[in-house]
Image: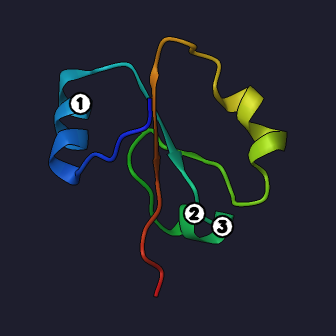
Amino acid sequence: MVANIGRDELKAKMDRGDPIILLEVLAPQYYRHSHLPGALNLPPGKVAEMAPDLLLDKEAEIVLYCWDTA
């Protein structure tokens, strides 16, 4: 299932300690500058290559996010 969630819902999940995998979908230079605590970087164009190594917990909810870099 795919669903959009807002900041408040994501914060609530993080505060509760829900099993989630946070993936920041931006270029590495943006990840190095700032990312959510515990987030992993999954740069555009590297999904097929990197996803299997990052998505080890098959029970966790996967949350993809990106910042507006404009």
Q: Nearer the viewer, mark 2 or mark 3?
A: 3
Taking 11 as reference, is 53 above or below it? above
Q: To which residue does mark 2 refer?
A: 32
Gap between marks 2 and 3 measured at Cα: 9 Å
Q: Tell me the crowding category of disc 2: few under 14, some 14 to 19, or many 20 or more residues within 10 angstroms, Cα based.
A: few
* Side of 8 relative to 48 (left or right): left
- The residue closer to the viewer here, 2 or 34, is 2
Judged from this view, the residue extending furthest toward the bottom is 70
| Residue 35 left/right relative to 41 | left
Q: Mark 1 points at which residue?
A: 13
Residue 52, placed above or below residue 47: above
Residue 7 drawn at (x, y percent): 22, 52
Going from the N terminus, do you reach mark 2 or mark 3 first?
3
The residue pinned by badge 3 equals 27
Task: Kindly identify the residue that appears in the image at 25 percent across and 41 percent down.
Answer: 10
Q: Which amino acid does label 2 sit on?
A: Arg
Residue 1 place in picture, x, y as percent = 44, 29
Task: Give coordinates of residue 6: x percent, y percent.
Answer: 23, 51
41 to the left or right of 68: right
